[in-house]
Image (cartoon, rainbow, N blue to C red):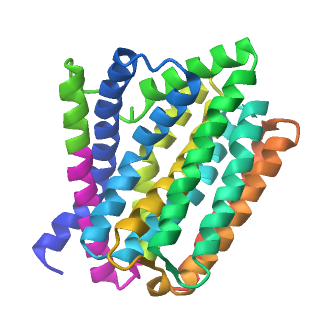
Amino acid sequence: MTELQILYLLGIPLSFVLISEGADWMTDGAAFLSKKWKITRTALGTVFVSVFTGLPELIIALLAIYHKSEGIVLGNILGANIASIAIIVGACAFIKTLRTPRRVIVRDGVFLLAATLAACATMIDGKIAKTEGLILLAMYVPYVINLYEMERIEEKYEHEEETKVLDVQLELLGKIIGKDVKIKNPYLAFFMGTGLLVLSGELLLRGALSLAAVTGIPEVFIGLTVVAIGTSVPDVVAAVNATRKGYDDLAVSEAIGANLFGTMVILGTVALIAPDGLSINGGGNLIFVSIGALLLITAALLIAMIRGRRIDRKEASVLIAIYTIYLLVAALMI
């Protein structure tokens, strides 16, 4: 083990904090820009928030492609999607029973299951081709159209409640440190936050690659665990803080929004940018086990949302159990 590898390994926990702080700065600037650009419609705001909450994962995926570490890319995307459901929804449901409004079930939950099935189908042949990546990206268009259509028919109180939740998402995203370091200039905050995300993403990626090299653990498993959790930190923090403040329906929409963006936009973009598409053969059976776990936990979330339109500790325990068993099975396959 070289001294540089030791430094990169020590940098992994630091990168978690820096990713969170970078997301905080960036969204502070984004919140100002959303008001300046008069992004008041709920549908546009939902897309706006999804883009900025998904940036840490997208940045690391692009950096991993640059370093030719496809195992990290796939592990990060699949692992983050599984972890976001288990950790965000599971942890928040233990704090307080989560409401699942009708609009979240009809508009987001059903679409998430369809998008997840489509994404997993592209992996069956061992490769996500550029055309399949383009299809995944294109699927985001009907989702956005559906957002606008649902907004037209929703009740006034639903619209006001969702607008409030979007503001809370931007306000709380990434606040992992007790006293945040604030940057007054919103433009500077936005660009410094984006820059910090790139730097911290590179630090996390190098730490992950060093961990794989030193321990012999496959890059895919590192991506499924360490990298996936690292990129999910801002979403987890935002959801937990919001639940404690009484915005208990935010956790579910946070998890679903992150997964929709990851499944269609991030996976699609990476497959499109990768020189020969995105190969999953390097991950072996770990990838296929992860695909099964993702389908299972997504279906379990949707069932939990539909039953009584609430998620309590019992249902959260099921989601966490699925995640725990999946990690144990994946670990045994190394």
Does the stretch in magenta take in 210? yes
The vertical placement of 73 against 92, above or below, is: below
Q: Does residue 128 appear left or right of residue 187 in this picture?
A: right
Magenta segment: does it hold 91? no
Please tell me whether the stretch drawn in magenta is mainly helix, strand or loop: helix
Give the image location of residue 177, x and y in percent: 34, 33
Query: Which quadrant of the rendered structure holds the N terminus?
Result: bottom left
Q: Quadrant of residue 226?
A: bottom left
Up the image or down, 252 lies above or below 243; here it is below
In front of the other: 20 or 276 = 276
Task: State the residue at coordinates (72%, 45%).
Answer: 109
**Residue under the point 62% across and 51% down:** 85
Query: Residue at the spot x=28%, y=81% of the render?
Result: 214
In depth, the one of 330 and 267 nearer the eye is 267
Q: Position of residue 94 (x, y in %)?
A: 68, 39
Pick the front one: 54 or 246: 54
Looking at the rendering, the stretch of residues picked out in magenta corresponds to 196-219
- Would you say 239 lies left or right of 202 here? right
Residue 293's x, y, as percent? 66, 68
Residue 27 left/right relative to 138: left
Write down the quadrant of residue 38 in the picture: top left
Name the side, left or right, on which 19 lies relative to 132. left
Residue drawn 57% across and 29% down? 43
**Residue 132, placed above or below residue 14:** below
Residue 70 higher or lower than 308, as above or below: below
Q: Position of residue 267 (x, y in %)?
A: 47, 62
Whether residue 202 can be seen here: yes
Is any part of residue 255 visible from this angle? no
